[in-house]
Image (cartoon, rainbow, N blue to C red):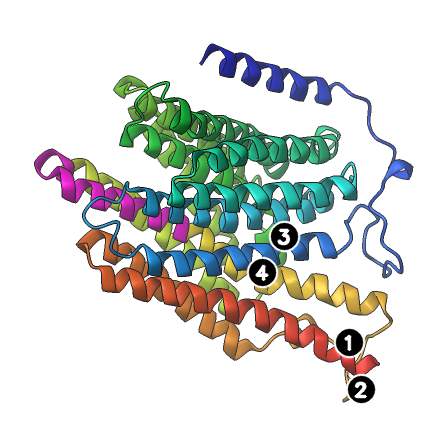
């Protein structure tokens, strides 16, 4: 454990050292993109990078759905068995993490106006992280411990590559809620990854006995101090753009949200992991402050939006409802566990499902805004600006809105079915949820691909 702590401190020192480096000149940018269309900033990476991450995330969601079908009986009545843990890692690593990492590769250059260090590092991060995110659940499910050890090493290497690639841009950017949130989320990623590597090696070496509390601590760190914080930070740029909203005055709730998310989630995870109630309870309160600030920011943007109610707004609001459910269920878990430990564990699993549902719904909703924009720039780079009817191609022309609405139904029903299935120990509901998530992945991937391919074929 001392060695792990020393490594953690050294990584932080490297990050501090990065902040002291002089600004990177734009002429050194390697974000090359032939035929870059006019108006697309030079810092924005080639479209293939974020699209590859988001496509891999869809495949991870499909695998999660299939794994839920396979492990539907294993979480009843104990949701901490290896098959369920494997499903959880498929969802968190191969789906949510890959999607979030793809998003930061796209939005850090946009937010900071600085290029990533290297597109080659982006591709290396994709290969290494996907390898780790698939090997870990496979190793856990098959109880092949050397596979889990290799996956832990790959995850650490993948995070190192990501840090090396994005830190220069974040270092040289002016501080604001989004930039500060992304900086802190990378610390949360380090914290979560080091916990994960420790647990992975422990499965083979048995350094100590890992309790469900420690598993929960790692889940809180990953979902709130890393992935959730990244979404909270990036949303401060996405909401004004996608809602056409300008919040007047000094909008402080976004800044409060990112700080409170990081401090609260870190304290809560540490308090739960080390059984320190005096640390966990203040952390929970601070995290609740961050969540309240996040809701305040969302309400402000919705109130001042100029865009009419659309499917994207429905996705975002539904996403925030899943976060609220996770909070209420967490409070219920504290009460139920005192009287019925088995039911308390089932509710704890439901809390994780709802928290993951918060991020999954947000990701699915936002890809229907993000991917069409990226695809539109691809068409523009090839000189395709109008369809067969002679009308200019718009973002909304690049996907079928009926199928987009269908994915809203499938992802919402999927999360609700899985959550209810674990809460009530109903394997059938878990299976239904898995099928819905599989359908969400398939429909989304096909829907966001066929529109662009249609215009590319028309051009030929």
Front disc: 4 or 3? 3
Q: Secondary structure at mark 2?
A: loop
Q: Residues within 10 Å of mark 1 (few under 14, many from 20)?
A: some
Q: Which quarter of the rendering shows the C terminus? A: bottom right
Q: Residue 402 appears at what percent x and percent y?
A: 51, 79
| Label 3 close to label 1 by CB (< 8 Å) | no
Magenta segment, prevailing SS (helix, strand or loop): helix
Please give the residue where the numbered disc 4 appears in the rendered image.
367
Q: Which quarter of the rendering shows the N terminus? A: top left
Side of 97 where 380 appears, left or right: right
Q: Residue 166 appears at what percent x and percent y?
A: 70, 35
The dot on residue 53 is: 3
Taking the spot 28% from the left edge, 20% from the top edge, the residue there is: 275
Residue 259 appears in view? yes
Of 162 and 370, nearer the camera is: 162
Q: Secondary structure at mark 1?
A: helix
Q: In which quadrant of the rendered view does residue 159 lie?
A: top right
Residue 245 inside the magenta-drawn segment: no
State which region is magenta: 336-357
Please give the residue where the numbered disc 1 appears in the rendered image.
456
Distance Cα–Cα, label 4 vs label 3: 12 Å
Taking the spot 28% from the left edge, 28% from the top edge, the residue there is: 211
Q: Residues within 10 Å of mark 4 (few under 14, many from 20)?
A: some
Taking the spot 43% from the left edge, 34% from the top edge, the residue there is: 145
Q: Secondary structure at mark 3?
A: helix
Q: Secondary structure at mark 4?
A: helix
Q: In which quadrant of the rendered view does residue 437 lie?
A: bottom left
Please give the residue where the numbered disc 2 appears in the rendered image.
390
């Amino acid at each position: 454990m001392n060695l792990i702590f020393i490594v953690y401190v050294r990584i932080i020192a490297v990050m501090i050292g990065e902040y002291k480096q002089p600004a990177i000149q734009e002429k050194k940018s390697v974000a090359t993109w032939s035929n870059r269309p006019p108006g697309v900033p030079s810092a924005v990476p080639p479209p293939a990078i974020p699209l590859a991450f988001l496509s891999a995330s869809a495949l991870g969601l499909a695998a999660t759905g299939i794994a839920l079908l396979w492990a539907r009986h294993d979480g009843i009545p104990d949701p901490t068995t290896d098959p369920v843990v494997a499903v959880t890692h498929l969802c968190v690593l191969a789906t949510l993490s890959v999607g979030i990492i793809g998003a930061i590769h796209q939005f850090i250059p946009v937010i900071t106006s600085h290029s990533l260090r290297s597109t080659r590092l982006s591709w290396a991060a994709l290969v290494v992280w996907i390898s780790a995110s698939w090997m870990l659940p496979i190793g856990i499910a098959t109880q092949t411990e050397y596979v889990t050890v290799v996956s832990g090493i790959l995850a650490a290497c993948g995070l190192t590559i990501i840090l090396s690639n994005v830190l220069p841009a974040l270092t040289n950017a002016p501080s604001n809620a989004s930039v500060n949130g992304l900086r802190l989320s990378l610390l949360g990623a380090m914290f979560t990854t080091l916990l994960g590597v420790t647990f992975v090696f422990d499965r083979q070496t048995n350094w100590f006995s890992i309790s469900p509390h420690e598993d929960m601590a790692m889940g809180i760190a990953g979902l709130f101090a890393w992935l959730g914080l990244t979404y909270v930070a990036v949303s401060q740029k996405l909401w004004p753009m996608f809602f056409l909203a300008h919040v007047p005055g000094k909008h402080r709730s976004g800044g409060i949200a990112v700080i409170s998310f990081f401090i609260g989630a870190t304290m809560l995870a540490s308090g739960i992991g080390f059984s320190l109630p005096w640390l966990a309870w203040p952390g929970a309160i601070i995290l609740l402050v961050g969540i309240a600030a996040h809701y305040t920011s969302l309400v402000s943007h919705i109130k001042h939006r100029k865009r009419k109610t659309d499917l994207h707004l429905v996705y975002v609001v539904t996403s925030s409802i899943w976060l609220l459910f996770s909070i209420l269920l967490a409070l219920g878990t504290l009460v139920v566990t005192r009287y019925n430990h088995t039911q308390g564990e089932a509710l704890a699993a439901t809390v994780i499902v709802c928290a993951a549902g918060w991020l999954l719904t947000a990701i699915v909703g936002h890809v229907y805004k993000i991917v069409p924009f990226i695809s539109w720039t691809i068409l523009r780079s090839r000189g395709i600006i109008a369809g067969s009817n002679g009308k200019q191609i718009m973002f909304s022309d690049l996907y079928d809105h009926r199928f987009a609405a269908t994915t809203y139904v499938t992802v919402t029903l999927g999360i609700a079915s899985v959550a209810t299935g674990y809460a009530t120990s109903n394997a059938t509901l878990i299976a239904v949820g898995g099928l819905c998530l599989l359908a969400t992945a398939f429909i989304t991937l096909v829907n966001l691909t066929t529109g662009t391919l249609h215009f590319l074929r028309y051009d030929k």
